[in-house]
Image: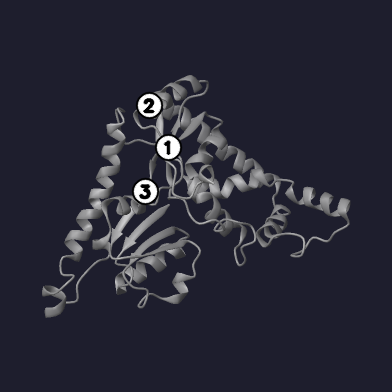
Amino acid sequence: MITLVVGASGATGRLLVQQLLNEGLQVRIILRSLKDFPEALMQNSRLTITQASLLDMSREQLLDHVQGCHGVVSCLGHNITVKGIFFPPRRLVTDGGRRLCDAIEKTATLLESMGHEVERAKPNYHPEDALIHCPNLWFLGFDKYIDALASATNRPINLDTLEPCTLDLYQKAKDIDPFTIFDSFDWVNRVRREFGKHFAQYDIWLTPTTVMPSEPLGRYNQSLTGLSTEEYFYLSETPVQYCAAYNITGLPAISLPLHQTSDGLPIGVQLGARHGEEELLINVSSALEQALPWANNTPEFHASKY
């Protein structure tokens, strides 16, 4: 789950951000200045900071930051002084809140403008549970595989041969027992049944492909230090939580680069459907491409230009 917090540098905002991070959630904040924000919080890998004035941001920039968020919290406020009440930025709370809500409304309107009958609905699926159960299934026997590689190459298993996160995964794989596996398979079966119920009522589930715009290269890699297995999976899998649902269920899905950020980077829209209905996805995708063609939507720096 991702939460956007504005007014994070104030007394209430700092406490809220700290609490959200302590709960293991991913947080985005927009700050005019980093001066009053705690250094310890800035180092947290689950925190994304944008340094800008909320009132100076364009509508498109706000939309980029709201994209993929499950909640937006405003901790904006004024000091109860003559300066705080009557001098700039005295309309920060009113104007900032209005523009954030406007960005959210624009997202909903944009989906409807594609020609879809849009209804707010989702399967009974909680991505945070996937972060618990999927690694159990993915890495069952991973330790045996690494042991075999080490034996075949006559190399030790340590930080000289494995990235820190990979080494931690290796150690955790040793602790996966049959009861854990049965519990995770039971969860997978429950998720598949819930998606079956959802697609009995709806033809397509429309979601973001990722829950945040593209980030700089290097943010996600197994050479990161100081992360537990759980923290690494939270970091790497949270952005693609809607994609993981189709790995779990085996249902067909497609991602379309229908929109762009203000920097020219693609924003993917994902469509999922019932088993065997790939034709429906392809037909709808073809219509969307005709309505919103993306062939020429390349950013300033793109491989095709060099």
Where is residue 75? Give x, y as percent: 27, 65
Q: Is residue 281 above or below residue 121?
A: above
**In the rendered image of this protein, does residue 295 appear above or below residue 45?**
above
Residue 256 is situated, as x and y percent measured from the top left of the image, at: 44, 35
- Do residues under tags 3 and 2 come within 8 Å of each other at their CB atoms? no
- Marks 2 and 1, how far apart in space? 13 Å
- Would residue 167 be seen by someone viewing this image from the given angle? yes
Residue type indicated by callout 3: Gln
Whether residue 121 sits left or right of residue 222 in the image: it is: left
Is residue 81 something that shows in the picture? no
Provide the residue designation for mark 3: 67
Provide the residue designation for mark 2: 290
The residue depicted at 30 percent of the width and 73 percent of the height is 10
Task: From the image, tell me which residue sits under label 1.
Answer: 296
Frontmost residue, 182 versus 31: 31
- Amino acid under disc 2: Gln
Of the numbered discs 2 and 1, the one sitting upstream in the chain is: 2
